[in-house]
Amino acid sequence: AKFARVLEHLQRTLLDQNWPAAWQLLNESQSSLRCQHCRNDESTNPWRTLFWVQQVKAHWDEWKDPCHAALRDALVGRLSQKETTMELLVSELRFTQVGHSERFKHGEHAGRRIDWLADQLKAGHIRVTDASMLVNVVFFHGSYRALN
């Protein structure tokens, strides 16, 4: 959360062309991510925000270097993230709970047994592409983590 706030402030500062404050926020953005896994996520996610922060710091005085525009674009993408739908293999998911119950507690299948859903899927009554089969995930520490 602190990293996102620093990025929001950095974005405004760059738009205002307040270069001393922008330099300070570039430094602060790097130091606000203490966890190495989070640093890796922010360097490799689709926006590569931390990567572009590092590039801009290295090329600060080279205003025509494409990294400056890339950072501005990365900030727009990173800060205006929208929910997206994507296909993942089950093997690509990590789970955020230690176990599960025999019945669904929430959603369209609430109260139903897990084996009931498996039977419905096998019989073709429910498709894996049905809206009820969507799993909410976040990308955290290098993996997609299931939230439901």
Image: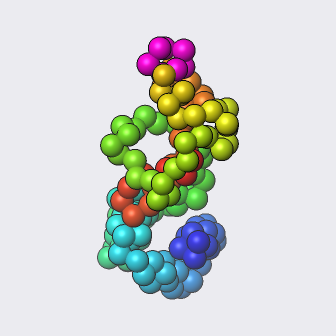
Q: Is residue 43 visible?
A: yes
Q: Is 125 one of the magenta-colored residues?
A: yes
Task: Please name the residue shown 36% across and 59% down the image.
Answer: 142
Tell me the quadrant of the picture where the N terminus can be found.
Answer: bottom right
Quadrant location of residue 16?
A: bottom right
Quadrant location of residue 52?
A: bottom left
- Please, is residue 96 above or below residue 106 in the view? below
The colour scheme applied to this rendered structure is rainbow
Task: Please name the residue shown 35% across and 45% down the image.
Answer: 92
> How far from the left and from the top, in percent, is residue 132?
60, 30
Residue nearest the viewer, comparing 30 with 134: 134
Part of the protein shown in magenta: 120-126
Task: Please name the residue shown 67% across and 37% down the image.
Answer: 110
- Asked whether, in this view, residue 103 is left or right of residue 89, the answer is right
Residue nearest the viewer, comparing 95 with 87: 95
Count of residue discs: 0
Task: Please name the residue shown 45% across and 77% down the image.
Answer: 33
- Please, is residue 81 above or below residue 65 in the view? above
- Asked whether, in this view, residue 95 is left or right of residue 112, the answer is left
> How far from the left and from the top, in percent, is residue 140?
44, 61
> How far from the left and from the top, in percent, is residue 15?
61, 67
